[in-house]
């Protein structure tokens, strides 16, 4: 591995730095966006049981809202029971937007890496080409410098692509997952609204 880094020259270091950041974000989001953390399986069944048994205590609502983001949306609806359907729907949408913003933490950096990495690879390619053409002199050419220039150019081109592709795929995967989770939460919140209205 060190041999490849050495052959790629100094332009590879910004790519290595961005790849480390990208990998850290991907691992963190994979852990944080797990369905069992965002939308616990027993959340809706527990809420439905409690709502059918009567009003839920304030302390219990606070605990539910702190346990998960889905719980935060459900309790936002329950705390505003008695208000019109239009207001409750508006609360669901606004809470969903706020939750989506939290779920998308650092995804903009991942998107930026997917865009910047190929440009860093291109920059390394240019540096390699400069070294390549510098090997030609009036007395001939330096074979070692020529080979070095090709090595720098190719490794950085490949490095930019290798860093960009996982970042781009991960970004789109996480965005799709977040959209799905928000939709599920909104469906659950609509069900809570039905339960509240049906109880009146």
Image: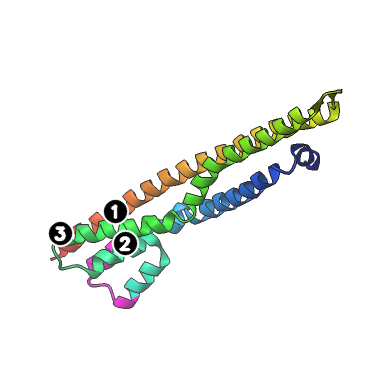
Q: Quadrant of the C terminus?
A: bottom left
Q: Are marks 2 and 3 in contact (CB under 8 Å)?
A: no
Give the residue pinned by disc 2.
Answer: 73
How many callouts does the rendering have?
3
- Residue 133 location in percent, x, y? 74, 28
Tag on residue 186?
1
88 or 124, which lies in front?
Answer: 124
> Which residues, given as a range, are shown in magenta?
48-59
Among the two numbered marks 2 and 3 on one chain, the one whose residue lies closer to the N terminus:
2
In the image, residue 150 lies in the stretch drawn in magenta: no
The answer to whether 65 is drawn above or below residue 166 in the figure is below
Q: Are marks 1 and 3 in contact (CB under 8 Å)?
A: no
Q: Are marks 1 and 2 in contact (CB under 8 Å)?
A: yes
Distance from Cα at disc 1 to Cα at disc 3: 14 Å
Q: Quadrant of the N terminus?
A: top right
Give the residue pinned by disc 3.
Answer: 85
76 or 124, which lies in front?
Answer: 124
Asked whether residue 198 appears in the rendered view, the answer is no
The answer to whether 109 is drawn above or below residue 157 in the figure is below
Which residue does the image show at 30% across and 76% down from the upper left? Answer: 58
78 lies left or right of 23? left
Q: How is the image coloured?
A: rainbow
Q: Few, some or many C-alpha atoms within 10 Å of disc 1 (few <14, some 14-19, many ≥20)?
A: many
Distance from Cα at disc 1 to Cα at disc 2: 8 Å
101 or 160, which lies in front?
Answer: 160
Distance from Cα at disc 2 to Cα at disc 3: 15 Å
**Kind of element beneath mark 3:** helix
- Residue 113 location in percent, x, y? 55, 45
Which residue does the image show at 39% across and 57% down from the upper left? Answer: 101
Which residue does the image show at 13% across and 63% down from the upper left? Answer: 84
Q: Few, some or many C-alpha atoms within 10 Å of disc 3 (few <14, some 14-19, many ≥20)?
A: some
């Amino acid at each position: 591995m060190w041999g490849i880094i050495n052959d790629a020259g100094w332009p590879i270091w910004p790519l290595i730095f961005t790849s480390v950041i990208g990998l850290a974000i991907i691992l963190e989001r994979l852990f944080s966006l797990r369905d069992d953390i965002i939308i616990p399986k027993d959340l809706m069944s527990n809420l439905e049981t409690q709502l059918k048994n009567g009003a839920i205590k304030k302390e219990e609502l606070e605990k539910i809202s702190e346990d998960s983001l889905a719980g935060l949306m459900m309790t936002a609806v329950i705390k505003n029971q008695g208000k019109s359907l239009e207001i409750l729907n508006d609360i669901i949408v606004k809470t969903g937007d706020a939750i989506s913003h939290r779920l998308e933490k650092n995804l903009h950096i991942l998107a930026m890496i997917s865009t910047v990495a190929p440009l860093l690879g291109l920059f390394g390619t240019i540096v390699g080409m400069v070294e390549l053409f510098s090997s030609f002199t009036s007395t001939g050419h330096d074979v070692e410098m020529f080979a070095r220039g090709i090595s720098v150019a190719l490794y950085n081109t490949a490095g930019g692509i290798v860093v960009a592709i996982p970042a781009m795929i991960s970004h789109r995967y996480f965005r799709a997952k977040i959209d799905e989770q928000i939709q599920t939460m909104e469906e659950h919140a609509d069900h809570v609204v039905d339960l509240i209205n049906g109880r009146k």
